[in-house]
């Protein structure tokens, strides 16, 4: 139930109870007063008339007295009767015997009998006992009480409706309106609108509440602004960090490119200079030209690898049979492995497909296998295996694991030192002797695997060999 | 620890006093470049010893200084900065730390500020890759003068 109707109801109820109690008391009081008034009137009239009648009876006889009573009775009105009570007609007037007896005994009495007020006054005129009876109906008193009740009820109803209307109007104005405004304001705050402070043109608790609410609103708006500014600052800091990181990557790349290309360029320029100066002649010129050619090829190779690293093409959605591709790579590497005294051991499930195109997979395997063979040293075994596993994707760490093909190349060579391990996927990072590697192989592998929505990881401890694991999204067998 | 130039030991030997050809140590990991530099310096009439990395370089330097004979000392060192194992910069730092201030030409593909600072402290001449043969000749001429023959 809403506040204003409830308030009104209680208010009206209280007033009703009070007024009703007051009305009841008032009616009782009035009726008692009416009674007293009636008795007083009876006594007053009765005594005066009784004295008069007694005298007339004494001087002029009973008939004259009775006549006088009739005359007086004619003026008494409808509701009043004046009765000459004697022993002879005591039973006729419907008066109880006990009262009649007491009245004739000379006692002045008043009693309510059969809806009437009876008052008796002794008469002394003759030798027979007689009494004057004043009898009045109580109808008038009843009417008076009823009228009082009706009046009280009507005035109660009037006051109640006035109070109800007043309570509703005042409740709306004093309570419901500010409460509604406050509720609206609170709702706006809840929706994040801190504008337009609430103004209540009054001086009460609602105004203080509105004032406090506005203050809270201001504080919230300030906090929100600060938060936004902070978020902006953090965002820009992150952007700057990313930029710095990109710059450092670019710097590393530039250093790598400069180093890789600087040497062959120096050689090319040197030999060209020698030929131009005529420092080399005859067959030496051909030799120099061959060297220039070789160095040019070397530079092209470096640039191709670099492009391979920079390549960011999305996965083509092509699925490759792992066993076919890996077996072909192993066959390619058999001669090299034989020369190095390394045995290649493969454990591949026959029907296992990953979403990667064959060329990319071949490139990944080529790099991993040549690294493994070089690291293995004579007499060891390089293990190649594939299995389906649940793994998480590289980017969404919150993702639930999905089915991946895990391709593992493990050697038992010297392993990778812990300080080197974090850098092995960086471009131009190499521990091999110059000429053996460009430092791009693993970074290219990393790029390819990431491109295909996969992940590459390495476990290695010095002296225990290395295990490269490539996780690629599993393709459904066709 | 940086070498203190005031503690400079006298250059162990000087080709001028021994009336011989200048001895040059060439340290470069790339075979082609090494051969080319060596050939160029030999063509100028110098005696050239080549090494392929920092470790070999240090052993060659140690060997030369141990012998204590003026004729075995190097008159010039030409070295690459980035080499597998011990880098050229590290090898030169060690040489300077034991007090040898043999002239050094260092070849680098990526001459950043840090390298320039090190080169200044270690008293090295920096030659940027790719370099022209004439630059190398000028540099060696600067250090070796008429020692060629």
Image (cartoon, rainbow, N blue to C red):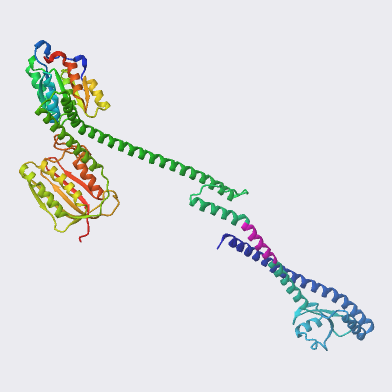
For the image, the number of numbered tags is: 0
Q: Farthest front residue?
A: A282
* Residue A255 on the magenta segment: no
Q: Relative to A45, is B24 above or below? A: above
Q: Picture quarter containing residue A271?
A: top left
Q: Please name whichever residue, A368 or A197, is drawn nearer the observer in this view of the structure.
A: A368
Q: Please name whichever residue, A128 or A244, is drawn nearer the observer in this view of the structure.
A: A244
Q: Relative to A76, is B17 above or below? A: above
Residue shown at 8%/17% (left/top)?
Answer: B72
Q: Quadrant of the C terminus of chain B?
A: top left
Residue shown at 11%/48% (left/top)?
Answer: A332
Q: Is residue B148 visible?
A: yes
Horizontal and vertical percent for residue A380? 7, 44
Q: Relative to A378, is B45 above or below? A: above
Horizontal and vertical percent for residue A437? 16, 38
Residue shown at 19%/49% (left/top)?
Answer: A359
Could you tell whether A160 is left or right of A38 in the image? left
Q: Range of the magenta residues?
A: A158-172
Q: Picture quarter containing residue A264?
A: top left
Q: Please name whichever residue, A330 or A36, is drawn nearer the observer in this view of the structure.
A: A330
Q: Relative to A423, is A27 above or below? A: below
Q: Please name whichever residue, A252 or A24, is drawn nearer the observer in this view of the structure.
A: A252
Q: Picture quarter containing residue A297?
A: top left
Residue shown at 68%/63% (left/top)?
Answer: A162
Q: Quadrant of the N terminus of chain B?
A: top left
Magenta stretch: helix, strand or loop mostly: helix
Horizontal and vertical percent for residue A348? 13, 55
Q: Farthest top residue?
A: B17
Q: Is residue B10 visible?
A: no
Could you tell whether A245 is left or right of A21 in the image? left
Horizontal and vertical percent for residue A289? 14, 31
């Amino acid at each position: 139930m809403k506040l204003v109707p409830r308030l009104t109801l209680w208010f009206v109820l209280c007033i009703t109870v009070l007024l009703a109690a007051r009305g009841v008391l008032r009616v009782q009081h009035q009726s008692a007063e009416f009674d007293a008034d009636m008795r007083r009137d009876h006594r007053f009239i009765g005594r005066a008339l009784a004295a008069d009648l007694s005298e007339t009876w004494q001087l002029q006889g009973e008939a004259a007295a009775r006549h006088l009573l009739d005359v007086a009775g004619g003026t008494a009105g409808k509701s009043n009767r004046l009765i000459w009570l004697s022993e002879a007609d005591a039973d006729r007037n419907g008066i109880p015997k006990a009262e009649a007896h007491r009245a004739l005994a000379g006692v002045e009495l008043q009693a309510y009998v059969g809806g009437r007020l009876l008052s008796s006054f002794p008469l002394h005129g003759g030798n027979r006992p007689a009494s004057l009876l004043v009898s009045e109906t109580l109808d008038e008193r009843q009417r008076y009480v009823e009228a009082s009740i009706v009046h009280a009820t009507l005035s109660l109803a009037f006051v109640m409706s006035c109070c109800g209307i007043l309570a509703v109007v005042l409740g709306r104005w004093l309570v419901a309106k500010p409460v509604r405004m406050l509720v609206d304001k609170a709702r706006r705050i809840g929706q994040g609108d801190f504008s337009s402070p609430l103004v209540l043109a009054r001086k009460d608790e609602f105004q203080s509440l509105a004032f406090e609410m506005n203050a809270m609103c201001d504080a919230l708006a300030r906090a929100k602004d600060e938060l936004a500014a902070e978020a902006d600052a953090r965002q820009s800091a992150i952007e700057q960090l990313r930029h710095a990181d990109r710059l450092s990557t670019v710097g590393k790349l530039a250093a790598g490119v400069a180093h890789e290309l600087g040497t062959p360029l120096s050689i090319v320029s040197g030999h060209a200079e020698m030929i131009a100066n005529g420092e080399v002649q005859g067959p030496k010129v051909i030799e120099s030209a061959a060297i220039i050619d070789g160095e040019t090829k070397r530079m092209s190779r470096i640039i191709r690898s670099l492009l391979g690293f920079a390549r960011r093409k999305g996965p083509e959605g092509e699925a490759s049979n792992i066993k076919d591709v890996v077996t072909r790579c192993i066959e390619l590497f058999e001669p090299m492995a034989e020369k190095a005294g390394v045995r290649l051991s493969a454990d591949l499930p026959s029907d296992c497909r990953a979403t990667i195109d064959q060329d990319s997979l071949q490139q990944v395997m080529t790099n991993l296998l040549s690294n493994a063979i070089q690291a293995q040293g004579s007499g060891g075994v390089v293990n190649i295996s594939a299995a389906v596993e649940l793994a998480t994707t590289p980017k969404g760490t919150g993702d639930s694991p999905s089915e991946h093909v895990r391709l593992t190349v493990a050697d038992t060579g010297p392993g990778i030192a812990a300080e080197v391990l974090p850098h092995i996927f960086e471009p131009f990072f190499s521990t091999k002797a110059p000429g053996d590697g460009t430092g791009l192989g693993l970074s290219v592998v990393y790029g390819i695997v990431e491109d295909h929505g996969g992940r590459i990881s390495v476990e290695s401890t010095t002296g225990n060999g290395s295990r490269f694991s490539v996780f690629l999204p599993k393709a459904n067998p066709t | 620890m940086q070498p203190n130039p005031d503690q400079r030991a006298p250059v162990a030997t000087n080709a001028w006093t021994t009336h011989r050809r200048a001895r040059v140590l060439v340290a470069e990991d790339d075979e082609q470049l090494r051969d080319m530099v060596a050939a160029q310096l030999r063509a100028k009439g110098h005696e050239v010893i080549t090494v392929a990395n920092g470790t070999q370089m240090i052993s060659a330097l140690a060997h030369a200084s141990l012998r204590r004979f003026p004729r075995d000392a190097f008159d010039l060192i030409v070295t690459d900065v980035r080499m597998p194992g011990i880098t050229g910069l590290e090898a030169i730092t060690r040489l300077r730390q034991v007090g040898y201030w043999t002239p050094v030409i260092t070849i680098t593909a990526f001459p950043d500020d840090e390298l320039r600072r090190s080169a200044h402290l270690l008293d090295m001449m920096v030659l940027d890759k790719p370099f022209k043969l004439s630059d190398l000749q000028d540099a060696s001429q600067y250090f070796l003068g008429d020692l060629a023959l």
